[in-house]
Amino acid sequence: MEAEARCAAPLRVFEALRLLGTALQSSSAPSTVWFKESSQKNLRSRDFLVPRGTLKNSFPDGEVPADVIEKLRSLAAPGLPPIKNCLQSEAGLLVQLDRPAVFRQVLKDFTPYLRPPSSADSGPDVVILNCAPLHSNKALEALRLSHLRAVLIADHLAEVLTLQGKHVYRVPAAFCTEVEGFLSQLGISWPSSADAPALEETVSCFKDLLRDCDEDTGDVDSAQSPGAIRVQLKTSAEKHNICLQGYDPNLDFFLVNEDDLRHIARLQRSVQAATSPCTVLHIVSCEEEFHQQKLDLLWRLVLPSTGDVAQKHLVCGRVKVVNSASAVTCSQYFQMRKSQMLEASVMKYGDSVQGESWDEIINSLTSAAIKFELLATPHRSQVNLNLEETNITTKGTKSGAFVMYNCARLATMFDSYNSAVSQGIYPEFPPARELSYSSLCEEGEWLLLFNYIMMLPEVLSQSGQMSSTSPGIRVTANTEVICKFLVSLSMDFSCYYNRVHILGEPLPHLFSRMFARLQLMKGVQSVLHSALKTLHIMPLTQI
């Protein structure tokens, strides 16, 4: 039964690192850090390593006792990949996995590797994602590139947090229809509905509460802020014992208008809709961070009960367009990238680039290119856009278009196989459990399995990791890791695809290896599609 449980459990790389570390620690040695190898050069000789320098901190002269090495060789547990050997070398203590057994266990059913691992995370089950730029009722022309970046990050986080089992509410649920149409071009379907009538009542109630909460609060009549209410934030916060740790020390007066009150009314409605304690995550551009902090405090003032709601701020860095004398709107950015993508496609495929199907392909490539440009940089760092840059097309190996191009290559390969089956050239694909994976001995094959298929659950988990209990109000998230993972996977797949002829000669003695490779390619394709889904990018099926 124990052996069956080990075989049934998905193999987890980070579980392997934990178990290997525990095995060394239990030998009376201090805690030892293992590393997963990822480079093709190092993977030729090992899969996990404790560097020699680290070993010297745990064992005399850096020599590991023979009984400890033997214990590691025989280590077996659910989630731990089968170990072939453990030995000490000049590099340190290394572990080599039983690769044919790992191939077999992963590829016979790779669906568990397309989602994050189950977690004992005690964080809140409900997350309210407040995308600050979408609260504005301004036209599309007022949506800046930094706003678009914040929207893309919010959309991506909503997907990965949902995959991790969180209940995600997206705020606001109503915004400019022109902006909504533009976002739909990018594959973003942010939930939208008309404001309920109760919102006006809430706004009116908030006005009354503000006027009563402080003797220095009052209406302001001016051409700039007609009907605004002046609130002393710092004084009122101190009076209500609101902790200001992490807030900008310059927060003082706030001229509150109806849009501000609508903003916090939408948040309040979402909190009321949540069925359990929640965290509110404000996603905001750095230019508007100060204003969002004011709204955070304003909400606490008008409704002191919100002090029980954790509010955190995820701040997105600027988007700077280099070599541009004037500001570039989101519409202009999209059209320029679309024009470049069309031009590159015509140069590569000629006059065939026309018609409805090619329009869809160009739009998909443009959407992917824009998302990778704005998401592949850590969210707190500035993005520098060169709109004259042509490497966003399929010529560049670090672009979304390159990832899409490799999706199309995989789809075309499977179409070719299915066509050959219908013609009787190849036999039908056998069940994955019946395949022999011992023929998968190419370096690139282990690289694709070990670095990507087996690593996707960890990447999906990492992409949504953030601390909502850290001091202060700012949090960071690893929103860039999916883009980097997809680019790296596409580059390694492309190298393998260019070197290895996957659909071999239709000779019976070659079918076993061909089917094993095709099953590996199915795993790669599923990983690509699953990761792209978190970005709301539809993979190309032809090009």
Image (cartoon, rainbow, N blue to C red):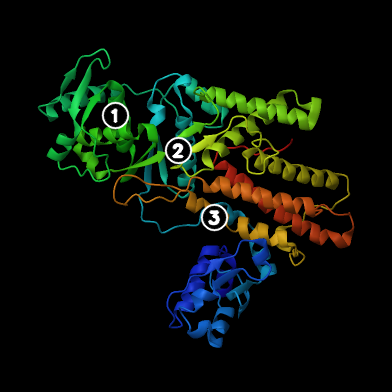
Spatial separation of the CA atoms under disc 3 and disc 1? 37 Å
Task: Between residue 211 and residue 172, name the one nearer to us.
Answer: 211
Secondary structure found at label 1: helix
Q: Which mark is residue 265?
A: 1
Say which amino acid is labelled 1: Ala
Measuring from the top left, give residue 30's x and y in whole percent: 42, 78
Q: Say whether marks 2 and 1 touch (CB < 8 Å).
A: no
Residue depicted at 67% across the width and 62% down the height: 40
Spatial separation of the CA atoms under disc 2 and disc 3? 20 Å
Residue depicted at 29% across the width and 30% down the height: 264
Whichever of labels 2 and 3 marks the residue nearer the N terminus, that label is 2
Whichever of labels 3 and 1 marks the residue nearer the N terminus, that label is 1
Measuring from the top left, give residue 232's x and y in whole percent: 17, 30
Q: Residues within 10 Å of mark 2 (few under 14, many from 20)?
A: many
Residue with the mark numbered 2: 154
Residue with the mark numbered 3: 457
